[in-house]
Image (cartoon, helix red, strand yellow):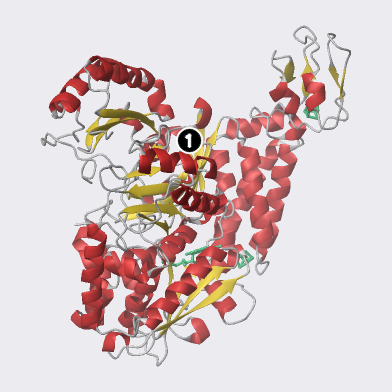
C-alpha cells in the first residue's frame, strides 16, 4: 500500500474555529465516494502560521497550497487533485498583485511571513558537524574575505548592507568596524556578546546551539576586517549546551585550519576563546562585559572612549552581538544589496524574536524588519491563548515598554519601537492578555532592575529602589495619586542621569504602562481594585451562598485550608487566613466563588 | 582531518553539497532528524531520540535509517520536533513527538508509509541557502 497523495488540513486553533474539522470530514467522505480512498491519506496538522488566510489545506507531494478553503471545496479538491492530478487553481494562494498561478510552498515570495537569515541553519544542520555547515555555504564568506577582498571592501560591504547591532542599541555595524580599523594599535580584539540576560529572551542561545560556526566565521571575518588576531565569546555559564557546542565548533575549525595560525594558507591568524559570565544582567553592557573579561568586577565605565577606540585592555575592540555576527557571512556571500532589499528605510534585514507569554504558537521566529506586530502575534503566533483578549506586548524586556492594540499595525524598526515608548532590545517579545496586570508587570521588571543594578551610580541604585517601593505600595492598595507623578519624575531623572542604559532604561516599562493604562493605576489607587486579579492584596475571594451547592470541591482544593462548611450547605471562606491563591475560584463548577 | 588549503575547502564543500542533495547518508536512505536545542531537550528530545533508536531496531530497520540531531527549528510550542526524509514519502516535520509515540511513528511512517495525524507542522520559512 502506498498513498499517491497526502492532503494536510490545518488543525491549528485559528483554522479549527473556521471549520477545518468539517473540511477534514468532507475530504474523507469525498475520497470514499469517488473511490480513491487508497490513493490519498488525509491528515490533520498543527498550525501553518498563516491564520489570516485560513483554513489552509496543503497537498503533498505537489506542494499545492490552498487558502480560505470551505467545506464545499472538498469535492473539487479530491476530484481534481487526486483523481485527475491537477491543482485547483482558484484556491491556490496568490500574493496580492502577483499573477502566477501556482503557489509552491517553497517559494519565499509567497506565503511565509518568516524569513530566516540568522537562523538559516538552525534546525537544518547538525551543529556538531562542521562539514554540514561547510556544505551550506559555510566559510564561503571567509574565503572571499581572505582571498578576494581587501579589509576596506569588507567594511564597505557591511556598511552598504545597512546592518545594525542586534544587541539592543542598533548601532551601524560597518561604522563600528571602520572606527576600529582606523584606530592605530598593534593589538586589537573582537568580542562576541552572548550574555543575553533579559528575562524571556533566548535568541542568542538558540543561534549558538543550532549554528555555532556562523558566529565563529563572522568573528574571523571581523578580525581580518579590523586587523585583530584574537577573539572572545562572552557567554553566560547558564548556557551549558551552547558552550559545549561552541567548544566543539572551535576545536573542529582549528583542526581543519579555518581558525588558528595561517588560516587556509592565507597568512592570517585568528584565535577564539570562550569566557564564561556569571549571569549578571549588567555584564551584557559592553563596557562592563569588557571589564569582566579583564578579570575585574563587571561595572560599566563612561563612554567615550568607545570600545572601538579603547576597549579590552585599552586596545581597540569590536564588540558585537551574536545575532549581528550571524548575519555577516550571509551578507558577504549574497551581497549587501540583497540584504538591504529587505526591511525598512533605516532598519535592514531581519530580526529574531523569542515570542512568549499568552500566545498560542510560542517560539523562536525571524521576520523581515517592517513586519507588523499584528502579523507576528496573530499570524505567526496564532493569536492569544484560550481566545482571551489581547492587552499588550512587551518588547525589549526590562528596558522596553508595552505596545498596545492601537499600535499593532506599526511596521517594526528600531525607530518605530522607540517612538512607541518601547525599544527593539535584543528581541524578547512577551504577549500579555486581560489576565495580566500592568502594575504587577511593572513591579516585576523593576524588581529585576533593583536586583541587577550594579550600584555604581545613584540615579539607578536609588531610583530603581524608590520606583519599586512606589509600585509595591500601589499594588497593595496604599497608593496615592501623587505617587504616579513621583514615578514619572524619578523615571525621567533616571533616564537622563544614569551612567549606563540599565538605569537609563529601567523606567521604561513603568512609564509606558502609566502612559497607556493610567486608568488601571488610578483604579488601584482610588478604588483599591485590580481588575486582572493579580495584585493579591486587592483581591478578596468569597462564596456566594445562593450559588453554592455545598459540593466541597473548593474546600478540598484549598491549600491552607480555610474553607469550611457542611456537605450540601453553603461554604464559607475565612478571609483572614486566605492566601489568595485562586484555587477555589478555578475549582468551583457553579461560579459560586467570587473574586472581587 | 588535517588543516586545509583553499582548494581543499572548496572540494570538500562541493562533495558535501552533493551528499546533501543525494539525500542519503552513509548509504542509508531514511533520515530522521531530531531537534536538540535546549528547548527540545527540556521537552524530552533525548528520550524521544532513544525511543526512536529502539523502535527502529524493533522494526528491523537499522540498516536503512540514520538518526541525526539538529538545533532549534523555532517551534518551541510543539517540541520535541522530528523531521523525516525518505524516498516515496513527502518530507515532513512532526511536533509534540514525545517518547511514547516513537513506536507508532516508526510503524506508521517508516513501515506503512502513512502520515501521523495531528503531529505535522510546517517548516517556518523557506531555505535561503538551497539554490
Ligand atoms: C544593561 C545592558 C545589558 C545588555 N545586555 C546585552 C546582551 O545581553 N547582549 C548583547 O548583545 N548586548 C547587550 N547590551 C548591549 C551592549 O552594550 C552592546 O550595545 C552590544 O553588545 C553591541 O553589539 P551590537 O552592536 O552587535 O548590538 C546590553 C546593554 C545594557 C545597557
Ligand atoms: S546605571 Fe545602574 S547598572 Fe549602570 S552603572 Fe549606574 S548603577 Fe550600574
Ligand atoms: S483563594 Fe486559595 S487560600 Fe483562599 S480560600 Fe481559595 S483556595 Fe483557599
Q: Is residue B48 above or below residue A44?
A: below
**For mark 1, what is the residue?**
A360
Q: Residue A288's x, y, as percent?
A: 57, 72
How many numbered marks have been drawn onto this rendered protein structure?
1
Rendered view: B50 above or below A133: above
Q: Residue at x 37, y 90 (%)?
A: A261
Q: Quadrant of ligand 3?
A: top right
Q: Position of residue A476 (x, y in %)?
A: 76, 37
Would you say B96 lies left or right of B65 here?
Answer: right
Name, please, the residue furthest toward the top. A546
With respect to residue A413, does A240 lie above or below? below
Q: For the point 26% across and 39% down, which residue is it?
A: A111
In the displayed structure, does residue A456 sit left or right of residue A376? right
- Point out the residue furthest to the bottom here: A186
Q: Position of residue A69 (x, y in %)?
A: 27, 23
Q: Residue at x 50, y 26 (%)?
A: A387
For ligand 1, tell me if the residue under mark 1 lies within 8 Å: no
Pointer 1 local density, CA inside 10 Å: few below 14, some 14–19, many at least 20: many
Q: Chain of mark 1?
A: A
A385 lies left or right of B16: right
Image position, residue A585 (x, y; %): 72, 23
Left/right placement of residue A193 relative to residue A437 reads: left
- Quarter holding the C terminus of chain A is top right
Q: Quadrant of the N terminus of chain A?
A: top left
Amino acid at each position: 500500500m502506498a498513498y499517491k497523495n497526502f492532503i494536510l488540513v490545518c488543525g491549528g486553533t485559528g483554522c479549527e474555529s473556521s471549520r477545518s474539522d468539517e473540511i477534514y470530514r468532507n475530504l474523507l467522505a469525498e475520497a470514499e465516494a469517488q473511490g480513491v480512498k487508497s490513493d490519498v491519506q488525509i491528515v490533520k496538522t498543527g498550525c501553518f502560521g498563516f491564520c489570516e488566510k485560513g483554513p489552509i489545506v496543503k497537498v503533498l507531494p505537489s506542494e499545492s497550497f490552498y487558502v480560505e478553503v470551505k467545506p464545499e471545496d472538498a469535492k473539487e479538491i479530491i476530484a481534481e487533485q487526486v483523481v485527475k492530478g491537477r491543482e485547483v487553481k482558484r484556491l491556490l494562494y496568490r500574493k496580492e498583485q502577483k499573477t502566477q498561478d501556482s503557489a509552491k510552498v517553497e517559494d519565499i515570495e509567497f506565503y511565509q511571513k518568516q524569513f530566516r537569515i540568522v537562523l538559516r541553519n538552525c534546525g537544518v544542520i547538525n551543529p556538531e558537524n562542521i562539514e554540514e555547515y561547510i556544505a551550506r555555504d559555510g566559510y564561503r564568506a571567509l574565503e572571499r574575505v581572505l582571498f578576494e577582498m581587501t579589509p576596506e571592501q569588507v567594511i564597505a560591504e557591511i556598511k552598504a548592507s545597512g546592518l545594525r547591532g542586534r544587541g539592543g542599541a542598533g548601532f551601524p555595524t560597518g561604522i563600528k568596524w571602520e572606527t576600529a580599523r582606523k584606530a592605530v594599535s598593534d593589538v586589537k580584539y573582537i568580542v562576541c556578546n552572548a550574555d543575553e540576560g533579559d528575562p524571556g529572551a533566548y535568541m542568542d542561545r538558540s543561534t549558538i546551539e543550532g549554528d555555532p560556526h556562523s558566529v565563529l566565521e563572522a568573528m574571523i571575518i571581523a578580525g581580518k576586517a579590523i586587523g585583530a588576531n584574537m577573539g572572545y565569546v562572552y557567554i553566560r555559564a547558564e548556557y551549558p549546551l551552547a558552550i559545549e557546542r561552541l567548544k566543539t565548533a572551535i576545536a573542529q575549525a582549528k583542526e581543519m585550519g579555518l581558525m588558528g595560525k595561517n588560516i587556509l594558507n592565507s597568512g592570517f591568524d585568528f584565535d577564539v576563546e570562550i569566557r564564561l559570565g556569571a549571569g549578571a544582567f549588567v555584564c551584557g553592557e559592553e563596557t562592563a562585559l569588557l571589564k569582566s573579561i579583564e578579570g575585574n568586577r563587571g561595572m560599566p565605565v563612561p563612554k567615550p572612549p568607545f570600545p572601538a577606540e579603547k576597549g579590552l585592555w585599552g586596545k581597540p575592540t569590536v564588540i558585537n552581538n551574536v545575532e549581528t555576527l550571524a548575519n555577516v557571512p550571509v551578507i558577504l556571500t549574497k551581497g549587501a544589496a540583497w540584504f538591504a532589499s529587505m526591511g525598512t528605510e533605516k532598519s535592514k534585514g531581519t530580526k529574531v524574536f523569542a515570542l512568549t507569554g499568552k500566545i498560542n504558537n510560542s517560539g523562536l521566529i525571524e521576520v523581515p524588519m517592517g513586519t507588523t506586530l499584528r502579523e507576528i502575534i496573530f499570524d505567526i503566533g496564532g493569536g492569544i491563548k484560550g481566545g482571551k483578549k489581547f492587552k499588550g506586548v512587551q518588547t525589549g524586556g526590562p528596558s522596553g515598554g508595552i505596545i498596545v492594540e492601537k499600535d499593532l499595525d506599526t511596521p517594526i524598526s528600531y525607530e518605530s519601537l522607540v517612538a512607541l515608548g518601547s525599544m527593539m532590545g535584543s528581541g524578547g517579545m512577551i504577549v500579555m492578555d486581560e489576565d495580566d496586570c500592568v502594575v504587577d508587570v511593572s513591579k516585576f521588571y523593576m524588581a529585576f532592575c533593583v536586583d541587577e543594578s550594579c550600584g555604581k551610580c545613584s540615579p539607578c541604585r536609588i531610583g530603581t529602589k524608590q520606583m519599586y517601593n512606589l509600585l509595591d505600595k500601589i499594588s497593595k492598595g496604599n497608593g496615592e495619586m501623587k505617587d504616579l507623578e513621583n514615578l514619572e519624575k524619578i523615571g525621567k531623572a533616571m533616564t537622563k542621569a544614569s551612567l549606563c542604559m540599565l538605569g537609563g532604561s529601567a523606567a521604561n516599562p513603568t512609564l509606558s504602562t502609566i502612559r497607556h493604562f493610567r486608568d488601571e493605576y488610578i483604579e488601584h489607587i482610588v478604588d483599591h481594585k485590580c481588575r486582572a486579579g493579580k495584585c493579591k492584596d486587592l483581591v478578596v475571594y468569597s462564596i456566594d451562598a445562593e450559588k453554592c451547592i455545598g459540593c466541597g470541591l473548593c474546600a478540598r482544593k484549598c491549600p491552607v485550608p480555610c474553607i469550611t462548611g457542611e456537605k450540601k450547605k453553603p461554604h464559607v471562606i475565612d478571609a483572614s487566613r486566605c492566601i489568595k491563591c485562586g484555587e477555589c475560584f478555578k475549582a468551583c463548577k457553579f461560579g459560586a466563588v467570587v473574586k472581587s | 582531518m588535517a588543516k586545509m588549503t583553499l582548494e581543499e575547502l572548496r572540494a570538500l564543500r562541493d562533495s558535501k553539497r552533493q551528499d546533501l542533495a543525494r539525500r542519503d547518508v552513509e548509504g542509508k536512505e531514511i533520515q530522521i532528524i531530531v531537534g536538540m536545542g535546549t528547548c527540545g531537550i527540556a521537552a524530552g528530545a533525548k528520550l524521544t531520540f532513544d525511543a526512536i533508536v529502539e523502535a527502529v531496531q524493533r522494526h528491523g530497520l537499522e540498516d536503512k535509517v540514520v538518526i541525526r540531531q539538529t538545533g532549534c527549528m523555532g517551534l518551541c510550542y510543539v517540541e520535541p520536533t522530528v523531521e523525516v526524509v525518505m524516498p516515496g514519502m513527502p518530507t515532513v516535520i512532526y511536533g509534540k513527538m514525545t517518547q511514547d509515540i516513537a513506536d507508532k511513528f516508526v510503524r506508521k511512517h517508516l513501515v506503512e508509509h502513512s502520515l501521523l495525524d495531528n503531529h505535522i507542522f510546517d517548516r517556518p520559512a523557506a531555505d535561503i541557502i538551497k539554490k
